[in-house]
Amino acid sequence: VNFRAVDDLASVWCEWIEMELRHKEYDKALEVSRRATGQKKFGEQKDKDVVQNRIYRSTKLWALSIDLEESLGTTASTRAAYDMTIEMKVATPTLILSYARFL
């Protein structure tokens, strides 16, 4: 499905992650969040007009993914997630402050 906005598609991914959490499938939720935020390579190679190719830039999705990494992931995976948001320039001031608190 071609979504109109990145936020619409990000909401679908977030709901999928939250559904896994409600069913106590924590590893699956972490896997889905990593899959959703790890789509940068696909977005670089294809048409920029398609929303699916820009999902990796969603701050909403990254915020949820980082929350999961802090709760369920390792210290290294959490740091990698924070570093990736900074590298891709999608980090918000709130995420930067959370990163500082985490460190």
Image (cartoon, rainbow, N blue to C red):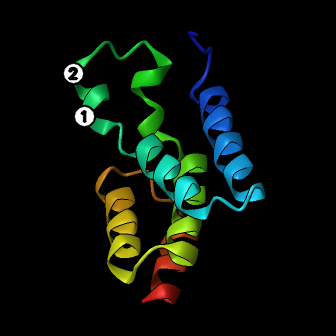
Query: Which amino acid is tagged 1?
Result: Lys
Q: Is residue 15 above or below residue 21?
A: above
Label pair 1/2, CB-CB below 8 angstroms? yes
Q: Is residue 62 above or below residue 70?
A: above
Q: Is residue 4 above or below residue 70?
A: above
Numbered-mark total: 2
Q: Is residue 87 above or below residue 36?
A: below
Separation (CA) of disc 1 from disc 2 = 7 Å
Residue at the spot x=32%, y=68% of the render? 80
Query: Which amino acid is tagged 2?
Result: Gln
Residue at the spot x=38%, y=64% of the render? 81
Q: Which residue sits furthest left? A: 45
Label at residue 66: none
Q: Is residue 79 left or right of residue 51?
A: left
Q: Circle 1 sits in a helix, a strand or a loop, which is it?
A: helix
Q: Callout 1 environment at 10 Å: few (<14), some (14 to 19), or many (20+)?
A: few
Residue 66 on image: x %, y %: 52, 65
Residue 70 on image: x %, y %: 53, 76
Q: Which residue is tagged 1?
A: 41
Q: Circle 2 sits in a helix, a strand or a loop, which is it?
A: helix
Q: Which residue is tagged 2?
A: 45
